[in-house]
Image (tube, coloured by chain):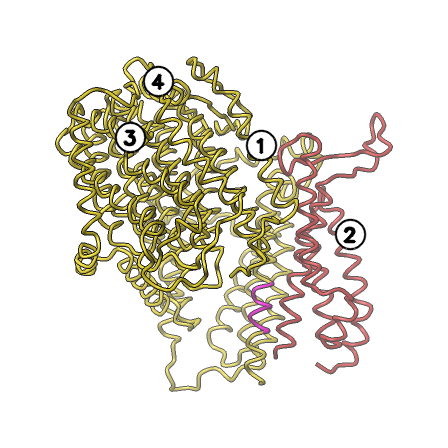
Chain colours: A yellow, B red
Amino acid sequence: MKDESADTPRGNGLIGVVPIVLSAALFGWFWTFLEPISNGEAVRLVWDWVPAMQISLSFLFDGLSLTFALLISGIGTLVLLYSNTYLAGHPQFARFVLFLFSFMLAMLGLVLADNLIALFVFWELTTITSYLLIGFGHETEKGRRSALQALFVTGAGALALLAGLILLGLSMGTFEMSEILARGDEVRAHQYYLPILILILAGAFTKSAQFPFHFWLPNAMAAPTPVSAFLHSATMVKAGVYLMARIHPAFSGTEVWVWTLTIAGGFTAVFASVLALRQTDLKQALAYTTLMALGTLTLFLGQDSAYALTAFAAFLIVHSFYKAALFLVVGCIDHATGTREADILGGLGRAMPVTAIAAALAALSMAGVPPLLGFISKEIQYAGGLEVASSPVFVVSAVLAASSLMFAVAGIVAFRPFWRPPGGEMPKSPHEAPWPMLAGPVILATLGLVFGLFPGVVQTALVNPTVAGFLGTAEGAATLKLWAGVNLPLMLSLATFAIGFILYAVHRPLRAYLARLDAAAPNFDRGWDRFLDWLKGLAAWQTRVIQTGVLRQYMWTTFAVIVVGVGATLAIKGNVNLAAAFDDVTWRNTAILLLICAGTILTMITRSRVAAITGLGVVGIGVALVFILFSAPDVAITQLLVETLVVVLVAVALLRLPFLDKRGESDHRPADAMLAVAVGTVVTLTLLAVLNEPFDRRLTDYFDATSWPAAFGRNIVNVILVDFRALDTFGEIAVVVIAALASYALLRTTKGRKDP
Amino acid sequence: MNSIILRAGTKYLVGLLILFSIYMLLRGHNEPGGGFIGGLIGATGFVLYALGCGTSEAREALRIEPQTVAMVGLGIALAAGLAAAFFGDPLFTGQWLFINETEDDKGIPLSTVLVFDIGVYLVVFGSILTLVFAMEEEL
């Protein structure tokens, strides 16, 4: 994919540098909010968007959104810097940067949005940009499949989310989240609480890849590594987590909330970390640890206590640091050696010392070893887990299992490749990555250490404001500290290390066993394929049934539905007065009626197509005469012209067709005549029923009165067409153009087929 | 169709029909007529031409592909609707300009509504001809 010359950090010129500078500037701008927000203020910026529908571009800066915004823009800057070298000289680099930067802006919009609809728009923008980024390697079948899978799964969830958000907005009477969240009791007591919750969680669970929607995330690793680092570990997949955190103040505390999130999160966390252990591809292993992190975050969001929420905030931050760093490290390894297979890699520590140190620091944080931030986060998780209201045993065992497995995976990803002898021949001889690719992992891994040593900084700047966002006050927030004394969490930590170490030691035999287990278990990824195949089969089947390709059957179905539908409505609700007054029937009306009847009879009995279409034309002209008699000249003229054109068109077509059915051969006409009579009867009865109702002149009077003063026109029909309802007309003429172009294309294709 | 009378008559009829169609288009705001009807009449003229003299000759006489006419019409209609944005009105609000307006006479009225109607005219005209020409050539 890349040649050796691309390894020099020559970048991609301006197009590579500008996004880096812009995102760094964004980061700086968010930084200025740190002080007011850690003092407990919240900033709201509002622009009107569609005020008539209560949709505004309102942005809320509070502890939670600012934490996310800083992580997104900060890691975004490092990832952009990294990609500038990682994909240096790639022919589609400009496209890549465009996608990545658009994604970052969408993600920032998503976490800062205060309006439900704006939030949804940004949410979908992240789905689309993520689709484009996963499918960046669209030349491969795998890339396309993964991209589509991610799009379908998260897109389907997003539709549910949209329904949930609209329902929430309508039931609360406002679409501003800050107002809704302030009325949490009302939300929880609302009759639609459960449907809203289910719909929103459907969106959040698909986006954040909670079991059983987890299968798209490991596949999304088809994207270039910087994308995986940014979207599929540090930011986008946390959008679902963010949403759950955002609505936590209004929705949490109910039985449904607590148990759904606890069970889904806990199960995802353990399940994913077991699967992580069995992966041999480093990137896949990391993908599953991301699932584990998402599960853990969901698990803690299910709880209400300040301790659990502190654990959420701390783990959110530390995970973003170490996971983005590790992904970038794997990118460096891939870049330097040409492989990511854990069984082949080894001995890289000597060739890539800086990468090795960054990897070690990040992995230690992931394993939860003191004095890194990961350790503190894990202690708080245990402490928070022990005092949850739902089920401390379940939460703590889930965390214990997941953390021990993380410990083992950390060893596989960041220890073995660097310090153990290689297991096979590597495609390229390893060398140290250039500095722009090292900056990201080194900075992020170092932050894990610095914040571990000085946890007070994170505490006041990010954790406390986030917790305050949940509870209104940061008073109950747990203190982050390295040494909390000899207590139960510390014991659990030691147990984690012990179990983790054993798992690491036996991970090879264990992997073979897990692989067998995994093969036996239901495979959601293959299930997804089967589901799509089934869907395609269904579509093909119903197309075969409905689209027979025989015009008669289409017409029959259409008219039969009209007869049954309208007839049934009439029978139930109709007020048909058969004794309607026919006293205003004049000789003119009778003459027109006879003309129409004559045309109809001609059409029915003739055996010549030209005569039949002429007969139909006579019927049309008769109808036009009716319009003229009842003073609707515009309609009459249009009818006349259309009739003329149709007769010409159909005559042109029919002249070339064979003669009508010969006598004796399947004559459809008796059946057709019955249907025709049925349609005629139903329409006549409908008209009689309509005549029974008093004539409503409101619209006519309105247009009569306003047409001249408001639109300077005396021809009401035309004024309605081009002024009052111009948008409708525009839609209609667009349909006319589309129909014309479509038939043109169809005619052209069949032409080529006919005379090859 | 090979009829000398039709061929000869068509040449004059087409011009008259086009002229009449424009007349119908322009008077449409106050009297029966308008873009739909005008477009239909104009198209009838060219359909006649195609019947009398053959499609290729009709295409030559039209000079522009009918699909292009339809698309241009759609563009003009959209532009007329978007113009309202420059005056701060909602989409498709008619904008009027009265030239030589006096106390009791409105003068020459120009409006985006008329521009929109011209777009409708071109769409109907172009779409029908696209269809008719293609069918004639197909068979």
Q: In the rendered structure, are the residues bearing label 2 and label 3 in contact, judged by CB atoms less than 8 Å apart? A: no
Task: Depth check: give the residue in front, A419 or A580.
Answer: A419
Task: Depth check: give the residue in front, A386 or A678.
Answer: A386
Left or right of B1 in this view: A292: left
Tell me the chain of label 4.
Answer: A
Q: Residues within 10 Å of mark 2 (few under 14, many from 20)?
A: some
Q: In the rendered structure, are the residues bearing label 1 and label 4 in contact, judged by CB atoms less than 8 Å apart? A: no
The residue at 47%/38% (across/down) is A121
The residue at which mark 3 appears reads as A370
Label 2 and label 1: CA atoms lie apart by 28 Å
Q: Name the disc covering residue A702, or none.
A: 1
From which residue to which does the magenta span run?
A741-748
Q: Earlier in the sequence, mark 3 or mark 4?
A: 3
In this rendering, the answer to whether A154 lies above or below A39 is below
Percent across and percent down for residue A361 are 37, 37
Q: Residues within 10 Å of mark 4 (few under 14, many from 20)?
A: many
Q: Name the disc covering residue B23, or none.
A: 2
The residue at which mark 4 appears reads as A468
